Image (cartoon, helix red, strand yellow):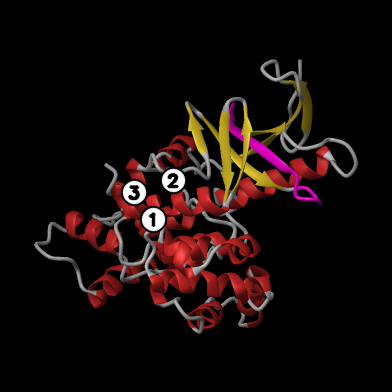
Amino acid sequence: MTTRHPDTRGFNFDERTGQLTTTLSIPTPETFRFRETLHYLTRSPAELLHQVEGDRVYKLLELGKDGLPQIVEIAENAGQLEIRLAVTGDRTGTFDEKVILKKAADYVREWFDLDRDLSPFYDLATDNPLLEPLTRDFYGLRIIGVPDLFEALCWAIIGQQVNLTFAYTLKKRLVETYGRSVTWNNRTHWRFPRPAELLQQATVEKLRQLQLTGKKAEFLLGIAQLMEEDSLSKPALLAAVAEAGGDFRAAEELLTAIRGIGPWTAHYVGMRCLRNPQALPVGDAGLQNALKQLLRLDRKPTEPEIRQLFAPWRGWEAYAVFYFWRSLAG
């Protein structure tokens, strides 16, 4: 029997596979609800970068020094998140369970935004007739991020000017064509293609065969080239923010200078990847539809109206957006 403590690891055998597995339990904030996370993660049947089975989430990560593939299983146990590594790579040589497990825990913390104190956001929502009901109904919801910059940028570009259902279909085709997969326990787990993989295998014409537009295909390949050259990276964007005294407009300016990235894409990536709490993709169709429904309008609100509406939530615009998106799912 394995005894588990916060921020410590344990070892046990997986009876299903006969392999040694590693687990770690990390504490979660009071203002966190795993059921809301599961609800978001199951919003599309076309999603294949993670799998939800019952009350457990499975995700393929490459966390080792040599990029060994690991299946991460995430579940809730006694008010904590229990992270379990199914060992799917070669355990000889450079495999270090402790290092791999810590990286997995760090990834989950960033993915679920666990280190953010949501109390100020909930305080701002108090007595607001529009936002308070959402924070009450969806209490504990956190912005589910896209930690990898290349994936976040590609996902945003794929989603430009198309509905969410078709965007998921396009992403699925892209991942199945150029990504990497691992089969474990009778399931196939996928990870998003790396910039180099896309550059080596894809062309504009091949991407168009997936039903991406020619322009979007060019944008994806252009961004892959920048990242492969190290002209664009998440650390560099965050460094620019730090040099600007925490002003995320520094990262926005760098992003919007890139072909295919406009204000909406920059704010979306700022929200989901760079963790800018002030990101406001004001032109987002989902946000406009949510506000139209909640405000009972016969038209979509204008951008000036949205900015005026968000003024009381300064500093927490991204979270307000995420809760409005959540309202669309009922």
Tag 1 near tag 2, CB within 8 Å: yes
Residue 136 falls in which quadrant of the image?
Answer: top left
Residue 205 falls in which quadrant of the image?
Answer: bottom left
Which quadrant is the N terminus positioned in?
top right
Q: Residue 16: percent from the left, percent from the top?
A: 66, 17
Vertical placement of 224 versus 93: above or below? below
Q: Which of these two is toward me, 194 or 296?
A: 194
Q: Residue 21: percent from the left, percent from the top?
A: 75, 27
Q: Amino acid at mark 1?
A: Phe
Is 69 colored magenta in this rendering? yes
State the separation of the CA atoms marked 1 and 3.
6 Å
Element under disc 3: helix
- The residue under label 3 is 326
Q: Amino acid at mark 3?
A: Arg
- The residue under label 2 is 141
Q: Residue 141: percent from the left, percent from the top?
A: 44, 45
The stretch in magenta equals 64-81
Vertical placement of 174 versus 41: above or below? below
Q: Is residue 136 left or right of residue 232?
A: left
- Residue lying at the far right of the rendered structure: 93
- The residue under label 1 is 322
Vertical placement of 172 versus 260: above or below? above
Tag 1 near tag 3, CB within 8 Å: yes
Q: Amino acid at mark 2?
A: Leu
Tag 2 near tag 3, CB within 8 Å: yes
Q: What residue is shown at x 62% (from left), y 33% (from top)? A: 183
Q: What residue is shown at x 59% (from left), y 27% (from top)? A: 77
Q: Nearer the viewer, mark 2 or mark 3?
A: 3
